[in-house]
Image (cartoon, rainbow, N blue to C red):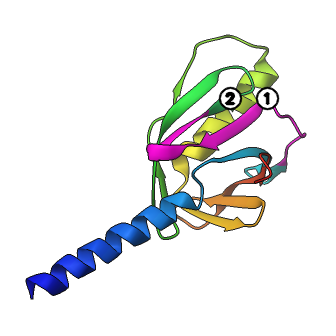
Amino acid sequence: MYGVLLSFAASFAVVAMADAQQLAGSEWTPTEIAGAPQEEDFDVFVQFGSENRLSGSGGCNRISGSYQIAGEELSIGSVAMTRRLCPPPLMDREKRFVSALEAAQTYLRQKTVLTLSGSDGLILMKLRQTDWD
């Protein structure tokens, strides 16, 4: 019985690691936030790094935080940001970008397109992969 439980636990750990690897090492820029198309701007991006850390830029400020993946579920903790001031349109876009990241509950990766959705299943943001690997 204990062997079966250990085998199950080991299998679950391997699956969880494989899930995290779906995004680890990739970089994304938003193409749509809350249904509104976004201009292609490589200053706005998120990188999903190893050890469940993320970093990037909202276009004005640097961002960092943590993330967890289990199957199709995605959990992003509070995103920390530097405190630079920029013109209101940039700050508004940055706020929408970070809010969408923090509200994400599920993700769907289809090759170079990443879709983040909220707990209600509505799409929060679509992103395009920019690191090409």
Instruction: Identify the disc placed on residue 124.
Output: none
Please say if 117 is above or below 99: below
Residue 26 on the magenta segment:
no
Q: Are marks 2 and 1 in contact (CB under 8 Å)?
A: yes
Please say if 65 is above or below 128: above
- Name the residue furthest right: 39
Amino acid type for the residue under numbered disc 1: Asp
- Classify 10 Å Cα crowding around label 1: few (below 14), some (14-19), many (20 and above): some
Which of the 4 image quarters holds residue 40?
A: top right
If the image is split into quadrants, where does the C terminus sit?
bottom right
User: Residue tagged by mark 2?
Assistant: 57
Of residues 12 and 83, the one nearer the viewer is: 12
Instruction: Identify the disc placed on residue 43.
Output: 1
Q: Is residue 124 left or right of residue 74?
A: right
Amino acid type for the residue under numbered disc 2: Ser
- Classify 10 Å Cα crowding around label 2: few (below 14), some (14-19), many (20 and above): many
SS assignment at label 1 = loop
Magenta range: 37-55
